[in-house]
Image: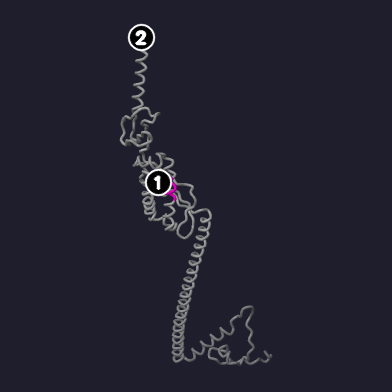
Amino acid sequence: MFKGNRIPIIAFLLGIVLLLVYASIFVVNEREQAIVLRFGEIQDVKTEPGLYFKAPLAFVGFDTVQIIEDRLLRLDLVDQPPVQVSGGRFYEVDAFLTFQITDARRFREQVSGDLNSAAQRLRTRFDAALRRVYGLRGFEAALSAERTEMMAEVRDLLRPDAQQLGLTIQDVRIVRTDLTAEVSQQTFDRMTAERLAEAERIRARGRENAQRIRAVADRQVVEIVSEARRESEILRGEGDAERNRVFADAFTRDPDFFEFYRSMIAYQRALAQQEGGDTTMVLSPNSEFFEFFENAQGTTPVAPEPDQAGR
């Protein structure tokens, strides 16, 4: 009967032993690191994954374990107040950074191992670093090759403060740099005015070139027409000279024929039917103009004598 009463006691003691063993074991995986605390003081930091032991009875102040992230973490900076750049204008900037807890002991000492507290302090310094970097440059810098340099400057400004928290800044990225609504409208109006002014300058240059081309063309037309008239006058003079020479030669060869020819031309011109009616001329029959109307020899034919009947 005594042996039967020992079995519950043994089971109870065995349960206590198992509970103490379970309370003395903790596991750290590859994405975590652990801080072992004894009465609130840091006793050890476990950064390698594995199975570890600690003193049990955490509820009475013995060893406790605080799990700390060992992954690469991201902090986004969005919906912040507009950032002022060089020149006084304001722009909306979104960015993010990646960081890692590399000094768990300092992280525990500075923010009690609270990731949210660390993120809040880091966000404040991140915003200040962005404003400082943008304040030294204009808006166009964030859209140019200087963007990479700006991100590196922000990262370097953050690293000393982050190290005080036990953090290491791995990278900083600027996601968006946009004009505010007010500045966007002002920029749009300014760009519109610049484009309109540029268009007017192009039109003015076009009108100037057109006038210059027209002036050159008009001068060439005048020169070509003048040259053509000069050549035509020369050719006309040469033709008249040749005609006069031919006429003179014809006159010397046969003056009577030449006189007859000139009279025929005169008849043709004088008796040609005028537009709108017949040609009427009142001249004496004995006029020299009708010299060749009488006969080919230029003499008036003798009229026949009337017969006895008076015919």
Do the CB atoms of the residues marked 2 and 1 lie less than 8 Å apart? no
Secondary element under disc 1, as helix, strand or loop, is strand
Task: Give left or right: position of 34 versus 190.
Answer: left
Query: Badge 2: how crowded within 10 Å, few (<14), some, or many (20+)?
Result: few
Residue that protrudes farthest toward the right in the picture: 309
Residue 126 sits inside the magenta stretch:
yes
Residue in the image at 68% along x and 91% along y: 310
**Numbered circle sitting on residue 208:** none
Q: Quadrant of the N terminus?
A: top left
Q: Which residues are magenta?
A: 121-127
Residue 195 position in % (x across, y down):
49, 62
Q: Amino acid at mark 2?
A: Gly
Residue in the image at 53% along x and 53% along y: 181
Residue 68 position in % (x across, y down):
37, 37
Q: Amino acid at mark 1?
A: Leu
The first of marks 2 and 1 along the sequence is: 2
Residue 74 sits inside the magenta stretch:
no
Closer-to-camera residue (145/104): 104
- Quadrant location of residue 298? bottom right
Characterize the magenta stretch by its predominant secondary structure.
helix
- Mark 2 or mark 1, which is nearer to you? 2
Relative vertical location of residue 10 with respect to residue 57 in this rendering, above or below = above
Secondary element under disc 2, as helix, strand or loop, is helix
Task: Give left or right: position of 53 versus 77.
Answer: left
Q: Which residue is identified by label 1?
A: 97
Closer-to-camera residue (211/23): 23
Relative vertical location of residue 64 with respect to residue 158 in this rendering, above or below = above
Q: Which residue is identified by label 2?
A: 4
Task: Give left or right: position of 260 versus 143.
Answer: right
Residue 130 position in % (x across, y down):
43, 52
